[in-house]
């Protein structure tokens, strides 16, 4: 009987310690749900997140979208080399074949869709990170 009481007391103490430990753990911060007040194209942050852009890349992506298209999906620059550039992030037509092979797009005009353009830009970004260690090189940005 003593052993049973001792075991019960031990379990009660263990439960208290575990509960205190769990309660004391910090709650990780949730991803920012709203763009900062300084965002240039805040209307695209939610879509960027939904296609997989990591939170820590959104500020740079925001500046690129602003610089390349002023947040507009219907922008096309035919003067760019390799057939011109399309959409929010001005994806160059030189990427179209590769993006088709990946299944990101089926035709170059798909890049006029904001969501598709952001998904394509993420694929290009990730490729550049892996291949060159320079994630933004397709947009002429070199990282230190």
Image: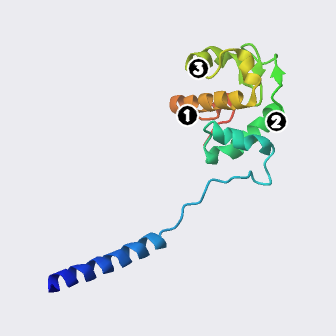
* Residue density around tag 3, few if under 14, some if 14–19, many if 20 or more, within 10 Å: few
**Quick one: SS at disc 3?**
loop
Rendered residue at 58%/20% (across/down): 103
State the mark number for residue 103. Answer: 3
Q: Position of residue 30 (x, y in %)?
A: 60, 57
Which quadrant would the C terminus be assigned to in this image? top right
**Mark-to-mark CA distance, 3 and 1:** 20 Å
Residue 32 position (above or below residue 17) = above
Across and down, in percent, residue 20 comes to 42, 76
Of the residues tagged 2 and 1, which is closer to the observer?
A: 2
- As drawn, the residue found furthest toward the front would be 1
> Quadrant where the N terminus lies?
bottom left
Q: Considering only order in the chain, which callout, 1 or 2, is on the residue closer to the N terminus?
A: 2
Cα–Cα gap, marks 2 and 1:
24 Å
- Which element type, helix, strand or loop, lies under badge 1? helix
Return the residue at label 2. 71
> Measured from the top left, where is residue 29 in percent x and y?
59, 60
Among the two numbered marks 3 and 1 on one chain, the one whose residue lies closer to the N terminus: 3
Q: Nearer the viewer, mark 3 or mark 1?
A: 3
Q: Decide: marks 2, 1 in contact (CB < 8 A)?
A: no
Name the element at disc 2. loop
Tag 2: Cα neighbours inside 10 Å, few (<14), some, or many (≥20)? many
Judge depth for marks 3 and 2 and give the one in front. Answer: 3
Front position in the image: 108 or 142:
108
Name the N-terminal-most of marks 3 and 2: 2
- Disc 1 designates what residue? 129
Q: Is residue 8 left or right of residue 107?
A: left
């Amino acid at each position: 009987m003593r052993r049973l009481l001792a075991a019960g007391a031990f379990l009660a103490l263990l439960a208290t310690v575990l509960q205190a430990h769990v309660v004391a753990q910090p709650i990780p911060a949730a991803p920012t749900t709203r763009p900062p007040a300084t965002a240039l194209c805040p209307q695209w942050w939610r879509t960027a997140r939904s296609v997989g852009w990591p939170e820590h890349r959104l500020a740079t992506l925001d500046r690129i979208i602003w610089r390349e298209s002023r947040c507009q999906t219907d922008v096309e620059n035919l003067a760019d080399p390799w057939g011109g550039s399309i959409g929010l992030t001005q994806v160059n037509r030189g990427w179209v074949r590769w993006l088709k092979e990946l299944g990101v797009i089926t035709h170059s005009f798909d890049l006029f869709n904001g969501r598709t353009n952001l998904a394509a830009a993420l694929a290009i970004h990730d490729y550049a990170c892996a291949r060159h260690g320079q994630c933004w090189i397709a947009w002429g940005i070199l990282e230190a």
